[in-house]
Image (tube, rainbow, N blue to C red):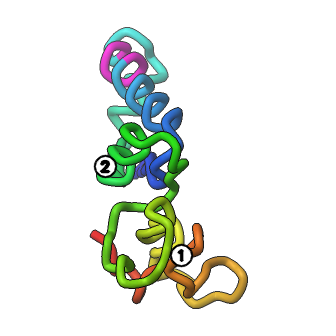
Amino acid sequence: VFFAMTGIHAREYTPTELASRWAEEDLINQYGIDTDITAMLDRTEIHLVIQSNPDGRNLAETQKWQLRRKNANTEGKRVPCFFSTRGVDLNRNFPFRWEAPGGSSTNQCAQTYRGVKPASEP
């Protein structure tokens, strides 16, 4: 099994484009033509999540001044954060080592805010 997730940080446009092109140009278009691609696809289950932060991506594209990293969760709107720092850093919201020191923040205004609990974000 091969799993790839791209687009976790809203402002990182390139990984989603690269994953899309790899899937289309290499995997789909080369299947049955390229022996390595064909063998890999015949033997491997592949799961691609091309855009895992669509709400944050939309804000990053339409309001470029923000340099948005996080999702568009507005639960932190009661906290006096700048608009661009509201939300949860999805990369810090995974259950594994969620409370590990130094890797994330409990401050809702921080760029590395991990959320209210592990896996709290959809």
Identify the residue position indicated by label 2 in the image. 54
Identify the residue position indicated by label 1 in the image. 109
Secondary element at tag 2: helix
Task: From this view, report whether residue 58 is shown above or below residue 114.
Answer: above
Task: From this view, report whether residue 18 is shown above or below residue 61.
Answer: above
Q: x, y percentage for residue 36? A: 48, 22
Q: Residue at x 46, y 75 (%)?
A: 93
Q: State the residue in front, 69 or 42.
A: 69
The residues tagged by marks 1 and 2 sit, at their Cα atoms, a distance apart of 20 Å
Using the rendered image of the protein, determine whether residue 48 is visible from the camera's viewpoint: no
Secondary element at tag 1: loop
Q: Quadrant of residue 50?
A: top left
Q: x, y percentage for residue 47? A: 33, 47
Q: Residue at x 36, y 48 (%)?
A: 59
Using the rendered image of the protein, determine whether residue 110 is visible from the camera's viewpoint: yes
**Please, which residue is most extreme toward the right here?**
102
Q: Is residue 28 left or right of residue 68?
A: left
Query: Which mark's residue is nearer the viewer, 1 or 2?
Result: 1
Q: x, y percentage for residue 65? A: 52, 44
Q: Is residue 121 left or right of residue 85?
A: left
The magenta span reads 25-30
Quarter of the picture holding the C terminus: bottom left
Badge 1 crowding class, 10 Å Cα cut-off, few under 14, some 14 to 19, many 20 or more, is many
Q: Residue at x 45, y 47 (%)?
A: 6
Magenta stretch contains residue 73: no
Amino acid type shown at disc 1: Cys
